[in-house]
Amino acid sequence: MSKTTAALEVAVAEYKKLRGPADQEPTARQRRDCDRVFARLLRLLSPRFRHFIRQYGLGAHWDDAEQCCAIAVHRAIEAYDSEKAQFTTFVNWQIRGELQSLRFRLMTDQRPSAQKVSATTVSLHSLASGPDGEETSIESLIEDEYALERTESSASDYLARAAAQCLIEEFVAKGRHAALESLRRKQPKRELARALKAGGRAGLDEAAVEAIEARLERDREILAARVFGELADYDAPEGSGLSREQVRQIGKRAAKVMAELAEVNPRFRVMADYGPTVASRRAARERTADRQAGLLPDPSAPHNRATSVRAISELGTDMTPPPTLPNNPGHLAA
């Protein structure tokens, strides 16, 4: 064992002893002593650092390479087991791995995939010529000031399309449930019980069920085409056999049902917040009716009764009624 190898073993053992248990917070004195021992380890390994940095061609990035070597020593100390190998051998592989990783990050043309296509690494800070011939950096040339706006817009479109698709599927599921329930109510109870007992589909007519599924699939295609702009308003899809009025009625009915679903279903609560909901429109109508009712006079109020003051006389012994005046509302006589 060489002097350097023995010194490394002693320094590593001393470092682990000073550091103490991992679950115990070291004191300021312990941290100071550990830093001194670690600095001694780096001095012992510095010739090896220089050798590997040159071997991996990282001379132009010397400071970064030295930092990677120090990280490798830290990791080697944490994972070192003196019973399996010597520290001088164990730390070599850690240093190689860190420097190899650094080289791949800095010089991507060193990778086998880049060598196949003769790729060359170019620094983003190297000078280049701008559109007007001025010197500028490559980083400023490739920067896209509208990239964030386009990314947010694309993400918003994707989420809106996915939410609309889910809402259409929810509308179709609700329509299927209502149609099947209506079909069950039309079935005689005896046939229904007999079919349930036999393990059938609750006595539902297969032809009627298929017709319901075909109608729902047609409505789904119409709604999806209209929502996503693939079909103009009230235009019937080819081969559907529907008129423009029928398509309009399907869209109107679906819009009302989907608005209610967006209001009551927590999954679509965000969509309901962007526009007036069924409840908000109903509340607005009620508020309008209340305001209109408040503009009319209250007929039960004393000042709104159809009465008029005929005469005012002093209270006394003479209780003879005053002479009758012309029937002129609002006329006051004394």
Image (cartoon, rainbow, N blue to C red):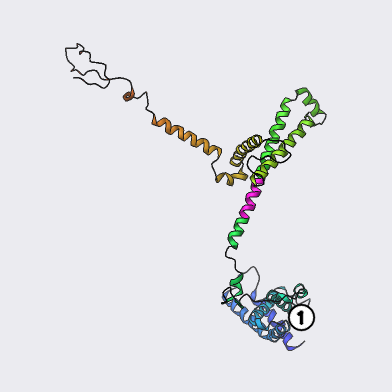
Quadrant in which the N terminus is drawn: bottom right
Judged left or right of residue 296, residue 156 is right
**Quadrant assignment, res 269:** top right
Residue 2 is at least partly visible in this image: yes
Residue 170 position in % (x across, y down): 67, 41
* Residue marked by disc 1: 89
Residue 149 image offset from top left, x and y in percent: 58, 59
Q: Is residue 219 magenta?
A: no
Residue kind at label 1, given as amino acid type: Thr
Depicted 321 relative to depicted 284: above or below: above
Above or below residue 75? Residue 49 is below
Mark yes or no: residue 97 visible: no
Q: Is residue 160 magenta?
A: yes
Q: Position of residue 159 (x, y in %)?
A: 63, 51
Q: Which residue extends farthest bottom?
A: 3
Q: Which quadrant, please, contains the C terminus?
A: top left
Residue at 66% x, 49% y: name it.
Answer: 162
In magenta, the rendered stretch is 155-165
How many numbered circles are shown? 1
The residue sitting at 60% across, 56% down in the picture is 153
Assess disc 1: are there few (<14), some (14-19) or many (≥20) residues with their C-alpha within 10 Å of its C-alpha: few
For residue 294, side relative to residue 86 (left or right): left
Between 127 and 110, the one nearer to me in the picture: 127
Quadrant of the rendered image containing residue 258? top right
Q: Residue furthest toward the right? A: 198
Nearer-the-camera pick, 164 or 184: 164
| Image position, residue 20 (x, y; %) | 65, 73
Q: Main secondary structure of the magenta part?
A: helix
Q: Quadrant of residue 187?
A: top right
Q: Nearer the viewer, residue 115 or 229?
A: 229
For the residue labelled by badge 1, is the local secondary structure a helix, a strand or a loop? Answer: helix
In this orientation, which residue lies closer to the viewer: 1 or 171? 171
